[in-house]
Image (cartoon, helix red, strand yellow):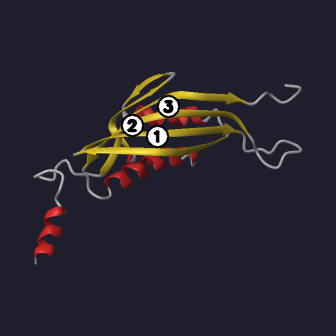
Amino acid sequence: MLFAALVTAGCGAGSASGADTPKADDRGEITQQIYRFYATMEDRQFDKLNSVLAEGVVVKTPFGVTTGRDKVIAQTAEAAKQEDRAQHVVTNVLVDVNGDKATVRAFVDQLIGSSKTPQGKMGPEPTTTVNSLMRYEAVRTPEGWRLSNVEGEVLWAAQAPAPAGQ
């Protein structure tokens, strides 16, 4: 009986109310929202960003600040018209949960280019590669975790030289 009491007592460790103790799956759910954020853009399913972004989301990029989910979605869809293909590789995701809010840090490599294979090449090649240190804030809503703030710092950027004759 003592063993059962110790195990049960240890289950609530962290705070008396448990309010600051993240649920076992909060970090995973938030990480999945980060992945969904980029997957919706890669799949050009911008309407699905409604299930990823909070209503008053703020996105800060080197090009400016956009506030509000509808504006962010519209701007994302418009920017995608300028690229034929994009891939985002998300690594080193660190999630800190504090009640109904969370902060996230991750590296994101963005590869941008054409879906057309250049003559003599094995497959399409990215024309631009950008590596950023991204920081996100997330909030728990009745519908689940949503990203409320997205900002990044470009660490590396490389552009492929234009093909000869252009």
Q: Name the residue under label 3.
A: 75
Q: Which residue is drawn at 10% across and 78% down?
A: 1
Q: Which residue is drawn at 22% across and 46% down?
A: 99
Asked if 127 appears above or below 98 in the picture, the reply is above
* Quarter of the image where one finds residue 9: bottom left
Confirm or deny contact between disc 1 and disc 2 (CB under 8 A). Answer: yes
Residue 117 image offset from top left, x and y in percent: 80, 45
List the residue tagged with mark 1: 106
1 vs 2, front mark: 1
Work out how far the residue at label 1 is from the one at label 2, CA to CA, in angstroms. Answer: 8 Å
Q: Residues within 10 Å of mark 1 (few under 14, many from 20)?
A: some
The residue under label 2 is: 136
In percent of width and height, residue 10 lies at 17, 62
- How many labels were placed on the picture? 3
Q: Is mark 1 on a helix, strand or loop?
A: strand
Q: What residue type is labelled 1?
A: Ala
Q: In this view, does 4 lie to the left or right of 110?
A: left
